[in-house]
Amino acid sequence: MRRSSDRILVSHAGTLPRPERLAALLHDGRMPEFEAALPAAVAEVVRRQADMGIDIVNDGELSKTRGFSGYVTDRLSGLTEPAGDRPRKNVAARDTRDFPGFAAMRGLQFAAGRRGQNPPMICSGPIAYIGAEKIAADIARLKAAVTGLDVEAYMPAIAPGTVDHWLINEHYPDEESFLFAIADALHQEYKAITDAGLILQIDDPDLPDGWQIFPDMSLADYRKYADLRVAALNRALKGLPREQVRLHICWGSNHGPHKNDIPLEDIVDLVLAVPAGCYSVEAANPRHDHDWRVWQTTKLPDGATIMPGVVGHCTDIIEHPRLVADRLVKYANLVGRENVIAGTDCGIGSRVSHPEVAWAKLDAMVEGARLATKELWGR
């Protein structure tokens, strides 16, 4: 994983806006043409990232038409669609309980987590990985796109515990065997990514946002819940090079109150129990802008870096580069300037109102990183 001893590197956490033609093909359901257009579209978004000064780029997750999590529904066997209406787990359940009027106003998007999302699936048989061709195609497009560019490439993949958000177990005898089966299957995708020389970003919003799902769960019980999911993730990562793994956590991307998000300090030890070379954490939105304080008393693992979100998806307001720089300098003073990478709270491509806003936020982050570099290194 790329490190720097003379400047703040820049990356981001995932989704980017689809180029207009690709988005139109997806909207119209013209999937053969969509697939044919993917290589050029990936090359376009990779080049745009490189040209604007992003150091660690991805494919924008352009091929993941079912989102950062649901994309694996056609890469795992043993899944069937439910016969009746089966609501997804509500990753805003605690806030829904405390803000019923707001939840009602926002409708299912906030209250039940259904609008704009895939319905849950049923695990009705043994889980196995059947996505070898799909991940190979994703890898090939990204590697072709970065050829000749002075960038490093990463590819996101979902964590076992977050798959559990939308997959209902009706086959395995208990929760542990269910999660470990998902982990064993996803290991193959993870290994394909690292074997290709790419950075593997594990998307694991479940680690913090699972807390919202169970309003009556105590902290002690939630830590047991989270610990099992960390064990499943670590099983999936077994044998893979730590220096090629980046763990991304967040508290869910819904535009709700987030008043009941679990504090980072209550789970930071579980986060750092995942063997990663970099930890990507939400840090820009108003509910988590203070989380830098956790790192006053918490030490990063030796050799690890942190990628705090310094621009966010919770607002269309473009962060000022000076604010971005201030956030980066604050983290640098806590963990060391060479251990900080500029990042986003979450994937912003589908979470702000317009592609122009998403790219402008990334541009502000790049400029903020330059300002922070000048302050931290004097150049």
Image (tube, rainbow, N blue to C red):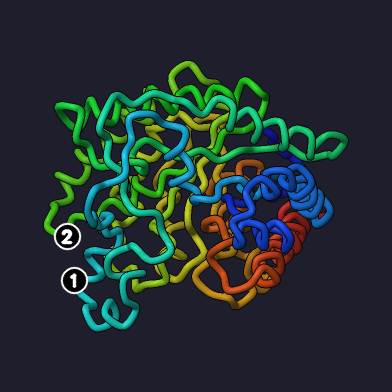
Residue nearest the viewer, comparing 45 with 281: 45
Q: Earlier in the sequence, mark 1 or mark 2?
A: 1
Residue nearest the viewer, comparing 123 with 188: 123
Image quadrant where one finds the C terminus: bottom right
In x, y percent, where is residue 227?
26, 35
Image quadrant where one finds the N terminus: top right
**Residue 358 in view of the camera:** yes
Q: Residue at x 27, y 59 (%)?
A: 90
Q: Name the residue carrying label 2.
A: 215
Q: Name the residue carrying label 1.
A: 97
**Residue 269 in view of the camera:** no
Q: Decide if residue 255 is on the left or right side of residue 180.
A: right
Q: Residue at x 28, y 50 (%)?
A: 266
Tag 1 secondary structure: helix
Name the kind of residue labelled 1 in the image: Arg
- Relative to 150, does residue 345 appear above or below in the rendering? below
Name the kind of residue labelled 2 in the image: Pro
Give yes or no for contact between labels 1 and 2 (Cβ–Cβ under 8 Å).
Answer: yes
